[in-house]
Image (tube, coloured by chain):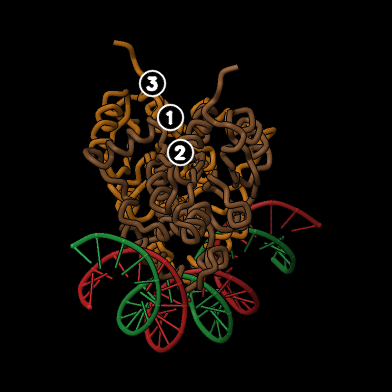
Chain colours: A brown, B orange, C green, D red
Amino acid sequence: MIKTAFDESRRIRVVMVDDHAVVRAGYRTLLGNANGIEVVAEADSGEAGFRAFVEHEPDIVIMDISLPGISGFEAIRRIVARNSAAKILAFSMHEDTAFVEQALQAGARGYVGKSSAPIILVEAVQQIAAGNIYLEPEIAQRLAFQKTRGPTSPFANLSTREFEIFCLLAEGFSASDIGSRLSLSAKTVANYSTQIKNKLEVNSVADIARMAIRHGIVEP
Amino acid sequence: MIKTAFDESRRIRVVMVDDHAVVRAGYRTLLGNANGIEVVAEADSGEAGFRAFVEHEPDIVIMDISLPGISGFEAIRRIVARNSAAKILAFSMHEDTAFVEQALQAGARGYVGKSSAPIILVEAVQQIAAGNIYLEPEIAQRLAFQKTRGPTSPFANLSTREFEIFCLLAEGFSASDIGSRLSLSAKTVANYSTQIKNKLEVNSVADIARMAIRHGIVEP
DNA sequence: CACGCGACCGGGAAATTTTCCCGCTTGCGT
DNA sequence: ACGCAAGCGGGAAAATTTCCCGGTCGCGTG
C-alpha cells in the first residue's frame, strides 16, 4: 500500500455545521473515506457550531452559510473573534460572488459551492488544513474578473453586517425578527435597513427582495 | 378583388392604449393593413385612454396592462364603469393566468399576450368587435385547466383591487405612492396591504415581492 | 323588492416601524 | 497616537401599519 502524507497522528479534525442531517451524513462518509480526515463533531446551527468549535478545537470548520438562527456569516465571525487562527471553509449552495466575498471577509479561508464535485470538498479541507486558502478555480476566476474589469457587485460597499441583514430582509423577515435572530436591538436593525437602502439606492424592502433574487442570493 | 365582410361604413374603430410609442406605431400599421380596422386614437396612459374612449366612443379598446400612472386594470374598470358595453381587449406581456383572470374580471372581453403572433391581435380585434370573447387558445386552455384540476392560483381570492395593489407593492412602491397613483388614501392602501398579506398568508412586502416574481407577475 | 353579502373606500386610535441624528466602542492602518 | 470606518444602539419625531369601525354600491337570491 502506498504511504500517504497523513499518518494516524496527524489526522485533520473537522467540525461540520449544516442544518440538514442528511447532508452532514453524506459528507461525513465522504470525508471519512478520504485519507487523514476525521469528522469529530457535527452541529445543526451557528450557535451549536460555535460551541462545538470551542469544545473540540478542530483543525477546520466546514460551515454552511444558510442556517436557521444566526447565519453562517455570523457564526464565522464569532469563531474568528474567539480564535483568529481558526480555519473555516464556507460551504453554500449560493454561487454568487457577493456571497463568496462576504464569507471571506467574515474570516473564511475558503469557499465551496454545494454543486461542486464532492472531491472538491476533500481537496479544500486538505488545502485549508495545510494553511492555504482554497477557492474553486471557477469561483476564484469570477471573483478575480469582477475585481478588475467586471462591473463591481452592488453589494461591494455593504459591510458584512449590512449584507447579512440585507439577506434576511430579502427573505421576508421583519426588523424585529432579525433583531432577535442576531441578538440585536430592533432599532439597530432598522438603522441598518435604512443604511442598506441608501447604499443600494432603493426605496423599499420589495426592491431589496427583487435585487436579492436577481443576484441569486435568495430563491424566489 | 374578393369582396370582404367589412365594407367602408362598418370599419372597426379602435383606440389603442400603450405607453410605448413604437409599439403603438407598429400595431397601428399592422391593424391598418388588416381589413376593416381603423385606429382612431392612441393614448400613452390609462387616464388618456379613458379620455380617448369618452371622446371617440370606439368599437374596441386595445389596452396594455403595464402602464405608468393608473394600471391597465384600473383603466379597464373606469371605462367599463362608464359604459358597461365597452369592448376591451387586454394586451400584456404577462402570460400568467392570474393576469388573464384579473383582466377579464375587470371587464376585458379578451386577452392577448405580446409574444403572440401578430395576426392573433387582428383576429382578436375582429372577434371582440363582433361581440365575442377572444382568448388565445393556449391561454384559454391553461385557464380552463386551472379551473378544473389544476391548483387554484393563490391570487384567486384576491379581488381586482387587491391584486392590483399586490402588483404595485411587489414592484416596490410605498403605500403612499400607490395611493397617489390610484387616487386613494394612503390609509386605504395600507388597509389593502394588510388584507392582502392575510389572504396570501405572508408577513412582509418582501414575501409579496418573492411571490410575485415566482408567478412571473413582476420581473426580478 | 328586500335582503344579505362582499368589494371598495376611508376615518380614528393605538401600536409599531422608520427615519434622522447623536454618541459610544473597537479594531485597523498609518 | 491618530483618524476612520464598522458596529451598536438610544431618543424623538415622523411615518406606516394594524385593528376596528362605518359607510356606499352593485349583484344575486328568496
Find residue A214 and report its image quarter. Answer: top left
Tell me: B150 left or right of C24. right
- Expressed as whole percent of the image width and height from the top left, the position of residue D15 reads 40, 74
Mark 1 or 3: in front is: 1
Q: Estimate the spatial distance between the alpha carbons at disc 3 and disc 2, rounded to whole Å.
A: 84 Å
Per the image, the residue denoted by label 3 is B5
> Dot 2: few (<14), some (14–19), or many (≥20) neighbours within 10 Å?
few
Dot 1 falls on a residue whose secondary structure is helix
The amino acid type found where label 1 is placed reads Ala
Q: Is residue B99 visible?
A: yes
Per the image, the residue denoted by label 2 is A130
Find residue B58 and report its image quarter. Answer: top left
Quadrant where the image shows the N terminus of chain A: top right
Q: Residue at x 43, y 29 (%)?
A: B124
- Subunit of label 1: B
Per the image, the residue denoted by label 1 is B124
The reply to whether callout 3 and callout 2 are in contact (CB within 8 Å) is no
The amino acid type found where label 2 is placed reads Ala
Q: Is residue B180 visible?
A: no
Q: Nearer the viewer, residue B29 or B85?
A: B29
Q: Nearer the viewer, residue A89 or A2?
A: A2
> Dot 3: few (<14), some (14–19), or many (≥20) neighbours within 10 Å?
few
- Expressed as whole percent of the image width and height from the top left, the position of residue A152 reads 27, 45
Dot 2 falls on a residue whose secondary structure is loop
Which of pointers 1 and 3 lies earlier in the amino acid sequence?
3
Mark 3 or 2: in front is: 2
- Expressed as whole percent of the image width and height from the top left, the position of residue A141 reads 32, 33
Are labels 3 and 2 on one chain? Answer: no
